[in-house]
Amino acid sequence: MWLLFAAAAQQTSRIRFGPRVSSVVLREPTLIAQAAATLDELGDGRAEVVLSSGNFGLLAQYGIDWAVTKPLSRVKEAAHVVRTLLDDGAITFDGEFFRYSGPFTFARPVQERVPVKLGAMRGPRSFRAAGELSDGVHRALSYTREAYDYLVESFRAGAEKAGKDPSSMDIGAWVVFATGPDPAVAKEVARGMVGLYASSMPAEQLERNGVGPRAMKPSWTPSAPAPWPGRSS
């Protein structure tokens, strides 16, 4: 996504670029900061950063057990690392997850302050952390008023705890969609993406989105062929 946005920055003049999310488990946060600074240079001050631990289902495909990564604590510490390197151009830090002895970057952002936001899906702690510790929150996969009210309430509590005005901060939404000349094919593509994310949702999050947890149970047995795009299940 950083490569695509770098190319797009050369062909546009107004649109802002916030690659979301950048996983701080799969990608080192100082590299994220340098990529953001470079993108900000290329786009003349239009870059943003959205950090997250990454989708738990995706981490499993990399052989990573999210339960032992302390996802929220890691993201909060990574946000400090990215913020420091963007603002100061160098960092010395001894944290729980990341340790540095003076690495620096020649890539310097054009903006006085590149927005650093947190991506979150379940909440409420991640929503509150975004309000308290970052410049905004980007929520993944919410499709009901109840789910967004839950997000806003938690985010506002975190912002107010830090003495911020939540109405001045960014709240973004990421939803799955697919387009194409054949609606059936587009729906199958979207189904695959939804399945990847929904598989890592706890019951209460599914219910806030109007989905009963039982609906997520597989409709096939291990002895039968697994459903695949284009096949009914």
Image (cartoon, rainbow, N blue to C red):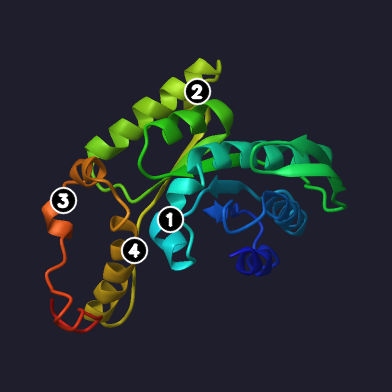
Q: Residues within 10 Å of mark 3 (few under 14, many from 20)?
A: some
Q: Is residue 24 above or below residue 204?
A: below
Total marks drawn? 4
Q: CA distance from mark 3 to mark 2?
A: 31 Å
Q: Which residue is mark 4?
A: 196
Q: Nearer the viewer, residue 17 or 106?
A: 106
Q: Nearer the viewer, residue 213 or 229?
A: 213
Question: Where is residue 155, by image quadrant?
Answer: top left
Which element type, helix, strand or loop, lies under badge 2? Answer: helix
Q: CA distance from mark 2 to mark 1?
A: 24 Å
Q: Does label 1 or label 3 sit earlier along the sequence? A: 1
Nearest-to-viewer mark from 2 and 1: 1
Q: Which residue is mark 3?
A: 213
Question: Where is residue 231, by image quadrant?
Answer: bottom left
Q: Measuring 45% from the left and 51% from the top, which residue is drawn there?
A: 66
Q: Amino acid at mark 3?
A: Pro
Q: Does label 3 or label 2 sit earlier along the sequence? A: 2
Q: Which residue is mark 1?
A: 55
